[in-house]
Image: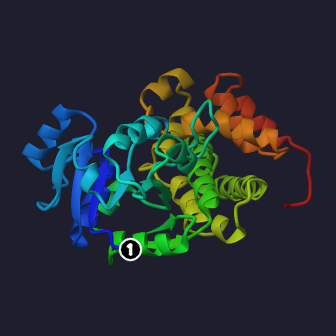
Amino acid sequence: MNFERIIVVGAGAWGSALANVIARAGRAVTLAARDAGAAAAIERRHESLRLPGYRLDERIRVVAAGDGADAADAVLLAVPSQQLRSAAVALVPSLRTGTPIVACAKGIEQGSRKFMTEVIAESAPRAVPAILSGPSFASDVARGMPTAVTLAAEDENLAAALAAALGSTALRPYRTTDVRGVEIGGAAKNVFGIAAGIVSGRGMGASAGAALITRSFAELVRFGMAFGARAETMTGLSGFGDLVLTCSSLQSRNFSLGVALGKGEPPAEARKSAILAEGLFTAPVLVEMAKARGVEMPIAAAVAAILDEKMSVTAAIESLLTRPFRAER
């Protein structure tokens, strides 16, 4: 399998960063903006509108969404999780049968409760779904800072070929066939990132922050096991690795949202300024899915209750701190 021509759909910060690092690895990269006006502006400036100050590699071709997919050996969908379905559907008319579509979003679709590769399989049935996830900030990747991620596909040969095509000294994809585990880690960590931000915003201290991350990881593992994820995936880059990054930096939209909530900003106001925080959409779906499988996730449930304004931050913290003492598991 030879993947020389790559199209990245979504010219936001993450899509632009991925296009940059892949182009520098020697691939022919097309960056597709979903808006024709944005595509023209990006092409003219050769700089992402969402990642100002970072020049796009001169070899990157910028087009409007819908162009170039027929010539692509692989497609990367770098759009928000709740928009991934429409982006995949738009590719269908020009997509060649068997073309891999790699989801680069971390979330679960609301309503359907489907993971990203399930959305791709349903909306673009001629494509082969895969997913790229792991501890990565767009600005780091755009600058060529060393970053390690996980690339998952059901076929190991495909996963290996895609990892080789997208990888470089700057971006190191580790491959796996545990698609579901990678998707769960990427989606759930956003919810726990909000929780960690709340702890930080409240000034509860480093000890509380460490405890929050540890217990969040326990919830992540329980949820993952219930949905068939492998233990090594949960402890790997797309599980524990991404959780640590998201729970420890203001570069994370989810952590930043949590900090605002912890400092007392009303949820309705905090949501307006954090519309791209995937945890906003994932929290209620994650809790619903956990309940359906009988998985205990008190931290995730508290975050969902805060976002839905069913519980104040103070009440949520108290509910967690007054839970019965129990054995660690």
Quarter of the N terminus within the rendering: bottom left
Nearest the eye: 57 or 91: 91
Residue 230 visible: yes
Q: Which residue is mark 1?
A: 1
Image coordinates of residue 310 in percent, x first then y, are 70, 22
Image coordinates of residue 265 in percent, x first then y, are 52, 27
Q: Residues within 10 Å of mark 1 (few under 14, many from 20)?
A: few
Q: Dot 1: what SS?
A: loop
Task: Describe the colour scheme in one phrase.
Answer: rainbow
Quarter of the C terminus within the rendering: bottom right
Image coordinates of residue 102 in percent, x first then y, are 43, 56
* Residue at horizontal 67 percent and vertical 72 percent from the top: 232
- Direction from residue 26 to residue 261 in the image, left or right: right
Most extreme residue toward the left is 44
* Residue at horizontal 61 percent and vertical 41 percent from the top: 114
Image coordinates of residue 286 in percent, x first then y, are 68, 40
- Answer with the quarter of the image where residue 60 lies: bottom left
* Residue at horizontal 28 percent and vertical 66 percent from the top: 22
* Residue at horizontal 59 percent and vertical 68 percent from the top: 177
- Answer with the quarter of the image where residue 99 lies: bottom left
- Direction from residue 95 to residue 302 in the image, left or right: right
- Direction from residue 234 to residue 200 in the image, left or right: left
Figure check: 220 above or below 260 = below
